[in-house]
Amino acid sequence: MKFIDLFAGLGGFHLALEKLGHKCVFASEIISELRELYQTNHGMECSGDINAIKIKDIPKHDILCAGFPCQPFSQAGFQRGFEDEKSGNFFYKIMEILEHHKPEFVFLENVPNLKTHDGGKTYEIIHTTLETLYDVREDIISPHYFGIPQHRTRFYIVGRLKKKGGLKNFLFPNHDKRPECNINDIIIPDDTDYMTLRKVTLNHIVVWQEFLDLLVKNKAELPTFPIWAMEFGATYKYEGIAPYFQKMRDFEEKKGKFGERIIGSSKDDYLQCLPIYAQTNKTEKNRNFPDWKKQFIRQNRGFYEKNKSWIDGWIDKIKGFENSHQKFEWNCGYEEHPTINDKIVQFRPSGIRVKRPTFSPALVLTTTQIPIFPWIVTPKGEIGRYMTRKEAARLQCMEDLKEVPDTIAGAFKAFGNAVNVEVVRRIAEQLLIDYEADK
């Protein structure tokens, strides 16, 4: 069958359908570097902005594939949906192509939040519009459901023309029984193309390991909630109106971050004494912090009160860390001797997150969140490094690509936007069952 690859990126749809014996007849990608790579990797020209291409110039095809831009619907973005000026209208461009060419199959991918965006109204519009021509199904699937060690849930939408009989026998690949994952399946220990850990990053890991060692030594219970160390010793008011909306008198005799006294000559000075997340005017409509934030503050203050005898001797070591690195998330469950160095570490805006070496967090567009493998000894003898480009390619099942962006930042941005080849291949294999049966 002939297929087109829209918003093509590195060509994940291309790789998946080519494995099943189908032929790409048209591709489109707005980023020039990725267009050049597409030609290198797939041996065909890749057009630019799909909005600048006349629909009649797109070759006839049997399958339309599109991982259309997710930013308008992602929880990480502004969630403007169809109102997003830059890329909110791309679904309608896809629909124009479908209405003109009427390919037998449509295969779309986006973020899970697309299903619930705007109270479900956005996907209701997409589903209803597609159903004017197609029998449509959808599911949320992650590579780790099939033993591929990456947690990356994505929303997949498939359809077949009603006039061709619709999706008579289609079922999404079964993922009820999910195998265990092991991150070592994709690690290349002797890879020499890696981003070195900075001394400050290594120090952060060492200092938080000291925290865990002290916790064990003092027979304290490891928190199941995120540790917000800035709350240790703090007494500012947070249960009622958020600090931003309080009067200056409400700060008197109170303590801010790390239990330091709130001082200054203005309310602005007072707010600067608080943890950065407590300074905000972005609150609930009643000018209160959301319940989850109040709960984390309450839990951290309670933890400190129980353990301040040993925390006070350690706390000065993290006061110079940047704000997000003063937070710590242990996502590994109970361990008698909790150890960071055999876990996956990720430096996130929400804190330093530590998880078991089962599957990687989803690859994202920024190098600051590339997973760290602290246990790996590099060819240069360094202990610990970031995930490499080749390992990221393995996570996306794209190891067959001849070339990827030549910087780690560029590669992870591209992989973070890509579809997972093996997941797409499995879905496509099921999707085309009816076509094979009807031949």
Image (spheres, rainbow, N blue to C red):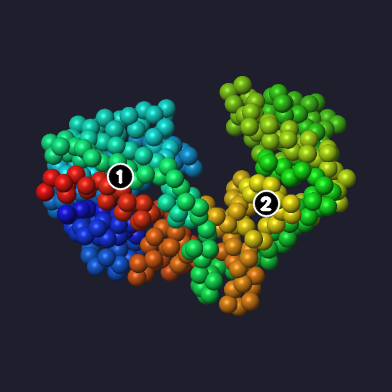
Q: Point out residue 195 in the picture as x, y percentages from the top left corner.
A: 55, 68
Q: What residue type is labelled 1?
A: Leu
Q: Where is residue 67 in the image (x, y as percent from the top left)?
A: 33, 48
Q: How crowded is mark 2: few (under 14 residues within 10 Å), some or many (20 or more)?
A: many
Q: Residue at x 60, y 53 (%)?
A: 356
Sequence-first tag of 2 and 1: 1
- Residue position marked by numbered label 1 in the rendering: 108
Is residue 221 in view?
yes
Query: Given the current orientation, which residue lies at the most extreme front position?
Result: 177
Q: Quadrant of residue 154?
A: top left
Q: In the structure shown, which secondary structural element does the residue marked by tag 2 occupy?
A: helix
Q: Where is residue 263 in the image (x, y as percent from the top left)?
A: 82, 38
In-front residue for pair 74/260: 74
Query: SS class of the residue under badge 1?
Result: strand
Q: Which residue is drawn at 22% across and 48% down?
A: 432
- Image quadrant holding the N terminus, namely bottom left
Residue shown at the point (79%, 51%) measured from the top left: 216
Up-down relation of residue 281 to residue 394 (above or below): above
Amino acid of disc 2: His
Give the number of the mark in front: 2 or 1: 1
The answer to whether residue 49 is above or below residue 294 is below
Q: Mark 2 points at which residue?
A: 325
For residue 179, side relative to residue 1 (left or right): right
Q: Position of residue 234 (x, y in %)?
A: 79, 37
In whole angstroms, how far apart are the C-alphas of marks 2 and 1? Answer: 37 Å
